[in-house]
Amino acid sequence: NRYIFQNKKKFIIKGFVVGDKQNIYSLMEHTGINEEDLVLAKWTGSDFLPGHYIAIDHATESVILAIRGTFHVKDALTDLKGHGTPFQTGFAHAGILEVAKHTYIKIKDDLINTLKKHKNYSLKVVGHSLGAGTASLLTILLFEEMRDWEEAIGYELDIHCHAYAPPCTVSIELSSIYKHIVTSYILGADLVPRLSYGSLTKLKSLALLVKNQTESNFSRIVQAINGAGSLSEGMTEDIKNFLAQDHITT
């Protein structure tokens, strides 16, 4: 939260008093959305339900569903539930899928009612970090029920997800299927979009490769530091092939 400190002696009270109102002020300042166009807001997360808001952006004729990233300890527990689980024709991050399904149930009626009131408005789902992964999977869930949604709102719905610094969320095959409705934005060599249960397993395999193919701890350390020898060449090729894979899936 960002607070306005008008008086040094009262800044603590000011911060607590404005509370959610200050979040609304910040939203208005950075997006240009008017307060009356904020449909609902849950600024902090709870069990498998991250902070989020629904707003109407008349400038782009869009209904916006924005989902917050990791903020609470409970959000971190979702991040740690990182093994893959069957989803559609592939696999998805188990914890994030659970969050996406829970969020989908909670916001579905509000989204439908809002879209009904704003005929032909598109739906933009956005999120950052954990929120980006949740936004991606929620968009897929909605897309798979698109016929029901369009029947409910009375027009053909244009939906797209904008995921900022998303964690690895779905398997490669699902990434290919749904890439037309999800766009990811990643800054340089950001670790989060490349970190997954699978990438850590691969890292472990590479570490064991070093351990098993060298004669001594001293040799392992020297080769790791200097990058010398046939082992280094083999590892370099393994790492190159690993990084060439499309681990960033949404």
Image (cartoon, rainbow, N blue to C red):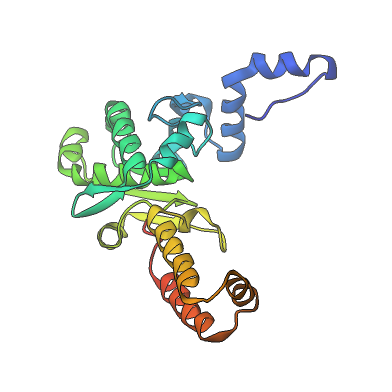
Q: What residue is drawn where x is 28% and y is 57%?
A: 178
Name the quarter where the C terminus is drawn: bottom left
Q: Total marks drawn?
A: 0
Q: Position of residue 133 (x, y in %)?
A: 40, 46
Q: What residue is drawn where x is 57% and y is 63%?
A: 188
Q: Position of residue 132 (x, y in %)?
A: 43, 46
Q: Nearer the viewer, residue 238 or 111?
A: 238
**Residue lying furthest bottom:** 230
Q: Is residue 117 above or below residue 167?
A: above
Quadrant assignment, res 206: bottom left
Q: Nearer the viewer, residue 124 or 119?
A: 124
Q: Nearer the viewer, residue 228 or 212?
A: 212
Q: Indicate left or right for 117 with 236 as reference.
A: left
Q: What residue is drawn where x is 45% and y is 71%?
A: 212
Q: Indicate left or right for 133 with 106 as reference.
A: right
The answer to whether residue 121 of the structure is visible from this angle is no
The answer to whether residue 50 of the structure is visible from this angle is yes
Q: Position of residue 151 (x, y in %)?
A: 15, 37
**Residue lying furthest right:** 8
Name the quarter where the N terminus is drawn: top right
Q: Indicate left or right for 83 with 235 as reference.
A: left
Quadrant assignment, res 18: top right
Q: What residue is drawn where x is 39% and y is 29%?
A: 49
Q: Position of residue 12 (x, y in %)?
A: 74, 17
**Residue lying furthest front:** 216
Q: Nearer the viewer, residue 8 or 58?
A: 8
